[in-house]
Amino acid sequence: MKYIKMLGLAAVAAMALMAFGAGTASATKLCTVNTDPCPAGSTEPVETEIHATLTANTTAVLETSGGTVLDTCTESTVKGKTAKTAAATGESVKGDIETLTWGNCTRTTTTEAVGNLELHDAAGADGTLTATGTTEVTIDTIFGSCIYGTGTGLNLGAVKGGSPATLSINVGVPKISGNFACPATGIWTANYTVTKPTSLFITHN
């Protein structure tokens, strides 16, 4: 059985909920209430544990730009923690992905490596998620062994603050190496729901 390594944008997903900010005069904050700037005492502390799962009744899909489906999964969980230090002025919230799992997939799907993510403050209580470290996922496929990776600086999608917060991924992931028949880009789409913390908003201080 041959495999295709694709980047686990999902991983990115969970991290999105752990991410970072983008202001020039303030730092991005993960807040427990929908107030911007985040009130004193309402900011999530450093090393906050983040859990996110594939939104109920949705499917994570990896397909070619032409619409050929390579793999689908109806279960996925991402777990990680925010950085050990708080974001400094003008910085985003950073975090490390600890676990990325997949289930009920049409192809054998296994996470090989997990990277890092950053969450940037956007409008209101929302943000955007960026991959700052490569995540790799192995998928059994008809194309043979193909490796896709997030790399650094790849915009994964939008994070919407709420109770719960959600992450929407829709991004093209470039092939790093592998069989010549592997698509040059894999389009990854998935929606995640943050289960911990139960309320999470992206603001600043």
Image (cartoon, grey):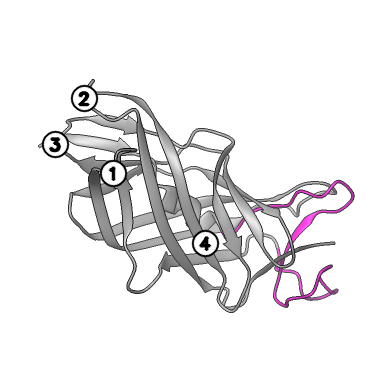
Q: Quadrant of the N terminus?
A: top left
Question: Which numbered disc flags the more N-terminal residue, 1 or 2?
Answer: 1
- Label 2: element kind: loop
Residue projecting furthest to the front: 66
Q: Mark 3 — residue?
A: 142
Q: Which residue is mark 1?
A: 67
The magenta span reads 17-45
Spatial CA distance of label 1 from label 3 is: 15 Å
Q: Nearer the viewer, mark 1 or mark 3?
A: 1
Q: Are marks 2 and 4 in contact (CB under 8 Å)?
A: no
Compare residues 65 and 29 and report the one nearer the observer. 65
Crowding at label 2, few (<14), some or many (≥20) Cα neighbours within 10 Å?
few
Q: Main secondary structure of the magenta part?
A: loop
Kindly identify which residue carries mark 2: 181
The residue shown at (40%, 52%) is 189
Q: Earlier in the sequence, mark 4 or mark 3?
A: 3
Q: Which residue is mark 4?
A: 167
Q: Label 4's element?
A: strand
What residue type is disc 1 on?
Answer: Gly
Circle 2: residue type: Ala
**Residue 90 appears at what percent x and percent y?**
83, 46
